Image (spheres, grey):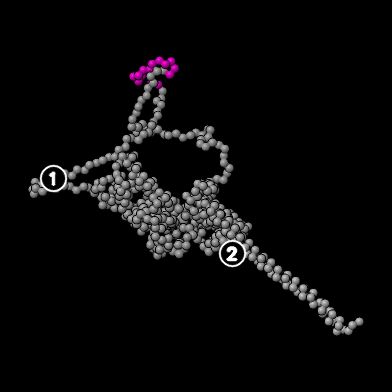
Amino acid sequence: MGCANCQQRGSTSGSGPGQRRVELEIERLRRENEQLREELRERERKLGEAEKQIADLERQLGLRDRNSTTSSKPPSSDGLAGSQRKRGSRRTKSCRKPGGQPGHPGSHRVPVPADLVDKVVEILPERCGHCQGPLPRNGGGRTGKVARHQVTELPPVRPLVTEYQCPSVSCPGCGKHTRAPLPPEVAGDFGPELTALVAYLTVVCRLPRRVVWALLEQVLGVKLSLGSVQAGWEETSGAVAGPCAELEKQLRHEPVLNSDETGYRTNGRKRWLWALVAPAFVFYKVAASRGAEVLVKLLGDVFAGILCSDRCPTYLKYHKGTLQFCWAHFKRNILGALQIAKTTDAERFCRDALSLHARLFRLWHRFRAGPAAGKTPMTRQQLILESIPIQKRFFALAQRNLDSGDNDVRNLARALFQHNEKFFAFIGHEGVEPTNNSAERALRCAVQWRKTSFGSRSADGEVAMARLLTATQTCRLQGRNPLDYLKQAVRSHRAGLPAPSLLPAKPPG
């Protein structure tokens, strides 16, 4: 046995290299572990970025697939190459051939009364259809009812040219010569009917000026220049200036207005075309802005009536009174959110909102249809009472989804929660519709005209286009013939008289 000190020195010397190896191995493993952790964190970061990129790409793809039924895009933007949007009924397509079905009574052209027929041609047979014997040609032997066949044809079209001669007459007293001036209504090269027709073809029929020029020259035989077409357009615009100004003043006194706006171009510069629809007229305005200052100029600092629109912030900034938000826009937004929803909660919100929307509009259609609805007619008071549970469910649905992880659902829920009363103004106010369709229809004809004319070239062109759209669309809303009105306006303008008013006649008393 050795001493204790020797044994301690031997033990220490024997464990020294092993301990060092263990410590080095631990350090190596620690470094490898830290490196693996760093690689894992980097891969998690890249995976998160990839998932976010995939979600963004999926959202972009979903937004690209949206059409006019799932967004506020116009139907003209759907295109022919995209997926066909569903229209009307969703039933499976029938195997029947198109057209009238067997047993259908059909419809036929009603003959013109005999007193309105311009020319009668009698056709007599020369020989008997049975024995081939000759038949009398002097009108004898007629039996039975005469078979009538009418052919409607255009007469030879040629312009009616009137020459006004103004001879110089010598005065027997002073010997001076005097020539009578032309009447104001014939001062131009073209009559009021032809001038009004130029504006009608351009605005109502939406034909480009060059096409109007070709139609007048090749079909009607009127020889004129392209500048004359423009001059007729401008003269008709001046003729309806007074009635349009009268409608503009009336806007701020209307109890209900529907408003919408769309993009426009003047000589390549961005403009906005506004359409404001009252119950009895339509007013158009081209402005450089989409802001509230346009509404201030048209409706005054404060509008006392009810303003119906989409959820554009311009209307919220301007109007502090009663607003009606468009349910058609809101439904399209819900359908668009459902189309790209990635969570069960988002899909549930969209489906619940669509279900409540359907219930609300069943009530509305029943109220609007009255006895034609097949049930007991619904009064305004009944509509208010039966819609209260639906309004409460909409509010609760919005409140539950204010903090939704889906951006679209969160935005829709907040809009419905913060502006709940603005979605239901139509329930209790007469003359208010739940959608802004009247303003959208008013803009549709303007957009179609814009697509063929590519906008205007000057400020005067903007004013002329807005005036003529106002006059013609107001006539159509009131059931008046736009062409007849334009003729009367041009005649009055040339005679120095005010054009016929476009305001509806006030009831007597």
Mark 1 — residue? Answer: 169
Q: Are marks 1 and 2 in contact (CB under 8 Å)?
A: no
Q: CA distance from mark 1 to mark 2?
A: 91 Å
Give the magenta-colored segment's residue range.
Answer: 129-143
**Of helix, strand and loop, which one carries label 2?**
loop
Assign the N terminus to one quadrant of the image: bottom right
Horizontally, residue 216 falls left or right of residue 65, namely left
User: Looking at the magenta stretch, what is its main secondary structure?
Assistant: loop
Seen at 35% across and 54% down, the residue is 457
Determine whether 382 is above or below 402 in the image: above
- Graded by Cα atoms within 10 Å as few (under 14), some (14 to 19) or many (20 or more), the crowding at tag 1 reads few
Q: Can residue 354 be seen?
A: no
Q: Residue at x 79, y 74 (%)?
A: 18
Q: Is 399 located above or below residue 220 in the figure?
A: below
Task: Tell me, yes or no, whether the highlighted magenta stretch contains residue 72.
Answer: no
Residue where numbered disc 2 is placed: 403
Q: How many C-alpha atoms fall within 10 Å of the one at disc 2: few (<14), some, or many (≥20)?
A: some
